Image: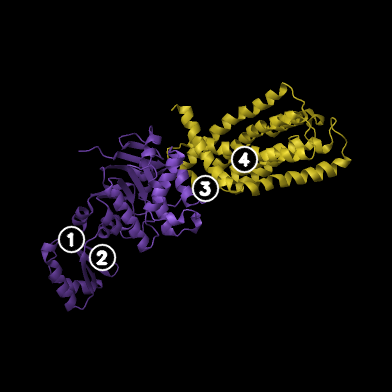
Amino acid sequence: MAEPVVEATDLEKRHGDFEAVRGISFRIEPGSCFGILGPNGAGKTSTLRMVQAVSGPSAGRLRVLGLDPVSDGATVRARIGVVPQDDNLDPDLDVRENLYVYARYFRMSRAEAERRAQTLLEFVSLTDKSNRRIRELSGGMKRRLVIARALVNEPELVVLDEPTTGLDPQARHHVWQKLRELKDRGVTTAITTHYMDEAERLCDVVVIMDRGRIIATGAPAAIIREHAGEEVIELEASEEDEKKILDGLSLEGALTERTGDTRLFFLSRRSGLADRLIERARAARAPCLLRNASLEDVFLRLTGRELSE
Amino acid sequence: MSRAASFARNAWRVTMRNMLVWRRLVLPTSIGYVGEPLLYLVALGFGLGQVVPRLDGMTYAEFIAPGLVVSTVMYTATFECTFGSYTRMETQGTYDAILATPIAIGELVAGEILFGGIKAAFGGVIVLGVATAFGLVPSWWALGVAPVALLAGLRFSAMALVTSSFSKSYDVFNYYFTLIIAPMYLFGGVFFPLDRMPAWIQRAALLVPLTHVVTLSRSLVRGTVSAGLVGNAAVLVGFLCPAYFLAEYGLRRRLER
């Protein structure tokens, strides 16, 4: 098996008294897309900052591209690309200069930096905006430019912290397309996101974090099967009505959960339980929805439905 | 590449980023440099100067011109590395973006200080040009004011960057300007000769960096050069190193969360 691009063992990060990351272990395989999911404050960004070699671990072992990100920080940073959560494009410079100046930080010659800037502007379809100032760009254009900037050094690993937050659907799809193109080139990516559909779509492996710990790991499909079954029925009924509907029906140990006025049933396809439930709901005229289980179900089941902050 | 060469190269990249931004603004900033010192020179030098007796053989305008050159250096460096640097660090996220590249915090600090120094020296040289046009610069030794201005610019930039790295908001800079920069401007020997003050004031003034810069500038402009000036320059260099390390420490604490 090839050496992992990132390997963390019992990794911890403390900020003063606050334990942001409390002993996590994971591997990111070459060429894969690795997703870190979790509510706000789960420790996702702290984890990424350690991987990026900008913030040292408080304890545990971390290897990035086979190197120690503390002692070889500059070498690690030279080989990875970063898309931060908040756009920190340089508002004092125009679009092309943002890429050019950034390329120069990576020790490229002027000519090389100029070439890279042109190529990347084409890659993210911003060539006709080269001379615009950053404040003149839309949110989607800014994101594309940040992604282009992260690729300026032809990184082996790209780290993206919530790359599509706040974007409109067109811009999100554009970003996804770019991430797939990176993957086709064999670039390894690590992303955090609050959008479960995004993680399902893009990631080969995801970890779900909560309060500084990893509480689930695996391929999205496998995690969904394990924690939320295959199908979900959402039954809208008061507790009393629900009792009547379910009266005498064997749930065969199916996972269920109540949230507000809705009862969720997490079912396997083989059980046939879905058909029986729907029949009974129809008879009682209770609104009822059958759908595929998703990563969002897993996320909410594992990290709780109440607001975490 | 050796460590030192690599450090210098990375620091220079940071300086060049600021130069690229400054290039667009060179003309307006240059007018700004000339404006205020010119007002002081006319109002105090030629206005108030009419009722001030000659000082060590100098008219009052001749006396204050070398000081106005270096106080421009002080103010330019201080503005750049307080409001300018703080904006890049806190508001624009420019430091975060830079530190995600191979550039290290020390190199960023050095690059910022170097830019502050160069910009400030540029301002000082422009004011020196204006003073020359008024016939207030009698000696060719005045060419030596340029490297002095650079050294002083680095010194004041480093001090300002230390302040920025420990500041929680822009408000802190008001205190810095009122409590540190303005007193230096008024009591650093720009407007009146310190050698007529009580001995304790003279000793206190030696602790103030601007005093040494004014002494250097005035001696070079007048052509009264002596070996003692090396001491004044040494004081500036001596304070540069601790300021650099303090700023690096402050930024590390702040940005490496």
Q: Seen in the image, is B211 located left or right of residue B154?
A: right
User: Tag 2: Cα neighbours inside 10 Å, few (<14), some, or many (≥20)?
Assistant: few
Chain at numbered mark 4: B
Please, what is the three-letter code of the amino acid marked with disc 4? Lys
In space, the residues marked 2 and 3 are separated at their CA atoms by 45 Å
Using a 10 Å C-alpha cutoff, classify the residue at mark 4 as few (fewer than 14 neighbours), some (14 to 19) or many (20 or more).
Answer: many
Q: Nearer the viewer, residue A298 or B31?
A: B31
Residue A230, label in figure:
1
Q: Which chain is purple?
A: A
Q: How far apart, in angstroms, are the residues tagged by discs 2 and 4?
A: 65 Å
- The residue wearing badge 3 is B90
* Residue under pointer 4: B119
Q: Sequence order check: which comes first, mark 4 or mark 3?
A: 3
Residue beneath the point at 61% across and 29% down: B239
Quadrant in the picture for residue A234: bottom left
Q: In the rendered image, is residue A43 in sight?
A: no
Determine the CA span between mark 1 and mark 3: 47 Å
From the viewer's perspective, is the residue at label 4 or at label 1 nearer? Answer: 4
Which residue is denoted by mark 2 in the rendering?
A258
Q: What colour scheme does the image use?
A: by chain
* Element assignment for label 4: helix
Distance from disc 4 to disc 1, alpha carbons, whole Å, reads 65 Å
Asked if labels 3 and 1 touch by Cβ distance under 8 angstroms, the answer is no
Q: Earlier in the sequence, mark 2 or mark 1?
A: 1
Chain identifier, colour yellow:
B
Residue B91 place in picture, x, y as percent: 52, 50
Q: Is residue B2 left or right of residue A239?
A: right
The chain that hosts pointer 2 is: A
